[in-house]
Image (tube, rainbow, N blue to C red):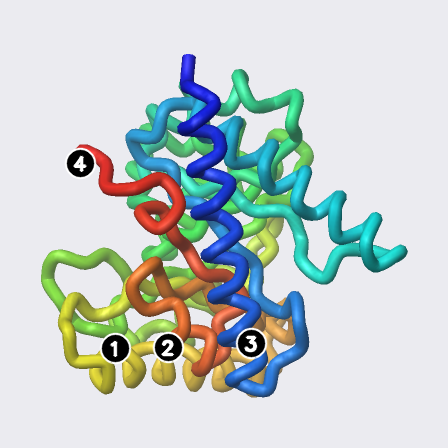
Amino acid sequence: MISDDERAEVARRLARVRDRIAAAEVAAGRPAGSVRLLLATKTVPVELVRAALEADSVARAALVTRDGGHPPVEAVILGENRVQELVAKAPHLADLSPELHLIGPLQSNKVAAASRWASCIESVDTFALAGRLAGRAVVSGRVLEVFVQVNVSGEATKHGVAPRHAVELAVQVAALGGLRLRGLMTVGANTPDESAVRAGYALLRELSEEIVRTGGASTSGATELSMGMSRDLELAITEGATIVRTGTAVFGTRPR
């Protein structure tokens, strides 16, 4: 069980992140609510995840009451890095109906488990993996949403297809039955140099625009950009992020 103080702190942290996103939208000249928030929940206890979802629901309901209309922000997305955590937590959150994404690397032997619980896989970086996901989706009679992950920084420690191959892979993935390509995902460069981080996000946006220009099957709507985390979400929003992923800013520092 978590304490009332822990619940209140998560709600406060979540509100601060929402405020940062809103301010960044204004600074970038973008419409309110154009950026969704994904909560990265690796190693976060399910009770704390529930507290965040409940706080988000309360805050958005308050906006409806205050403004007399729909809230300007959508519900948070949950993102898990590890399939085993996704499988363990998802059943305990099902009553809250969260949108669940897998944001970490996916091994072929875990495709079935990931596909069962996740509505979206953000870490597709090979055509072989996309093909396995597509086959599973077709057998299940569903359409699985995916992002192609791109390694814009070129760092060996990061997953993702190389930028020079990203457009080709995205077009191939978009053409597969059983999948809907939503866009591209990346993890920003691990450097204090903001110009380098921003350049990587700009590159992802440019690749997205190139994918749409190909006119390939099902690529016209693949315009989403999942990029930016707790430390650099403002830079990502400036460069066109539609989803920013944050864990530490809401849940605090956690064990790896």
Q: Nearer the viewer, mark 3 or mark 1?
A: 3
**Farthest residue toward the top?**
1
Q: Find the distance from the CA under tag 3 to the CA under tag 2.
A: 11 Å
Q: Which residue is mark 1?
A: 197
| Mark with earlier residue (3, 1) | 3
Q: Secondary structure at mark 4?
A: loop
Which amino acid, mark 2?
Answer: Leu
Q: Which residue is mark 2?
A: 235
Q: Secondary structure at mark 2?
A: helix
**Direction from residue 202 to residue 63 in the image, left or right:** right
Q: Find the distance from the CA under tag 1 to the CA under tag 2.
A: 8 Å
| Mark with earlier residue (3, 4) | 3
Residue 65: give x, y in percent of width and height: 83, 48
Image disc number at residue 256? 4
Quarter of the picture holding the C terminus: top left
State whether residue 145 is above or below residue 171: above
Which amino acid, mark 3?
Answer: Glu
The crowding category of the residue bearing disc 4, from other C-alpha atoms within 10 Å (few below 14, some 14 to 19, many at least 20), is: few
Residue under the image location 44 percent in, 32 percent down: 114
Kindly indicate whether the residue at mark 2 contacts the one at mark 1 (C-beta within 8 angstroms). Answer: yes
| Mark with earlier residue (3, 2) | 3
Q: Secondary structure at mark 3?
A: helix
**Farthest residue toward the front?**
5
Residue under the image location 38 percent in, 52 percent down: 246
State whether residue 104 is above or below residue 166: above
Q: Which residue is mark 3?
A: 25
| Mark with earlier residue (4, 1) | 1
Which amino acid, mark 4?
Answer: Arg
Kindly indicate whether the residue at mark 4 contacts the one at mark 2 (C-beta within 8 angstroms). Answer: no
**Farthest residue toward the left?**
156
